[in-house]
Image (cartoon, rainbow, N blue to C red):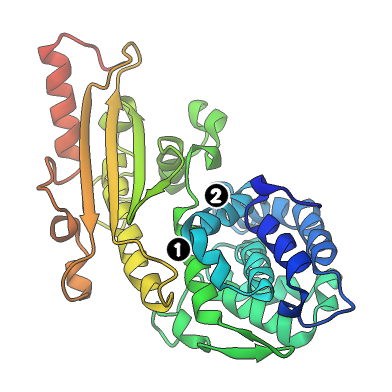
Amino acid sequence: MIFNKNDGLRYSLEKRFNDKKKEFPNDDVDYILFYKEIEDYLNKNVHPETEKGALLHGDGLLTDHGVDHVAMVIQRAELLLGEKINHLSGFEIFILLLSIHLHDIGNIYGRDKHEENISKVVNDLNIMSRLQTPVLATIVNIATAHGGEYNFSKDTIISLPVSEYVEGIEIRPTILASILRYADELAEDHTRAAKFLLNANILKGKNRLYHNYSKTLEPIAITGDTVIYNFNIPIENIINVSLLKEESKTNMDIYLYDEILLRLCKSIRELDYCKKYSQGFIILNAVKAKISVYNKTAFNPLYSESIRLRLAGYPEQSNFTIDKLCENKLSFKNGYELKEHVLSIGEKDNVKPF
């Protein structure tokens, strides 16, 4: 065995190949060695360049989009699938894994419309040309559907067939794309942040906001039908403005708390979207977040709140706002209100905010 149980989907791929070779199209190909060769090549030569490419194209320093991010998306996909992995064929697992590997490589040519540049990078990779053209086309199309637009709509998965036969094996691209897309949405935590650069105050603007968001987030968990987010936030990230209004698209200063609420809404909106195409592979219905604010000198939080968002009602775009999705009334509408509350607690308890 090349992979072990800790390798998740890759272990499932190898086990399926060893037990059910009929689920793969070509008897002459060792799909495990082939996958490992592609993965090793991409991890060494391509994934480490994604953030550098975005930086060179003026997008600043992205949170991690390299080797570790790809591994995290693979892990989140396994978490989403659970026992339903048994309802994917071995060849579908192979295609899903390679789609995950390709989904962010377009960042080499810049963040804007990076999903449209996936094929541009793939065309320069000799190792990918060893895949039959229909197989590679399916992989690239699934990877491309993880973001961007199709016919001026964010509904990109609709561009994919529900079912197609590739090399004589049935593949369900819409299901695989829905799993990839929501796994990517959940592939966020403190390991993606450039902590030293944050502490050195080198990152600026949106990049600083995005890295601070990642830095405060623990690894995401799933229990039952609920995604669990836990944010542990130093008080300075609550009371300081993260993005000045002249840097944002709004007429208000943006605080980290505002970004958290925005991301939670996006998470459940993406859940609603991906679930439609997953044909029962995604069974989640809710997103729960615990937000805790800490003073440097204390182990217990200065302030803590829990937020639970759930899918309910007809899915109009206007329903995907934090106040309509939240089961309990929010204590604070925005980051400025939370900042004022935290400062008042500090004054009452005679606690300095730093």
Q: Would you name the residue on which mark 2 appears?
A: 62
| Residue that protrudes farthest toward the front in the picture | 19
Residue at the (16%, 71%) spot, across then down? 313
Above or below, comparing residue 31 to residue 344 in the picture: below
Mark yes or no: residue 255 visible.
Answer: no
Q: Would you name the residue on which mark 1 appears?
A: 182
Q: Position of residue 240 (x, y in %)?
A: 29, 31
* Secondary-structure class at tag 1: helix
What amino acid type is highlighted by mark number 2?
Leu
| Residue that protrudes farthest toward the top in the picture | 350
**Residue 188 in the figure: left or right of residue 61:** left
Query: Depth check: 207 or 34 in front?
Result: 34
Q: Position of residue 324 (x, y in %)?
A: 14, 60
Residue at the (50%, 58%) spot, across then down? 82
Q: Position of residue 124 (x, y in %)?
A: 80, 72
Query: Depth check: 19 or 305 in front?
Result: 19
Considering only order in the chain, which callout, 2 or 1, is on the residue closer to the N terminus?
2
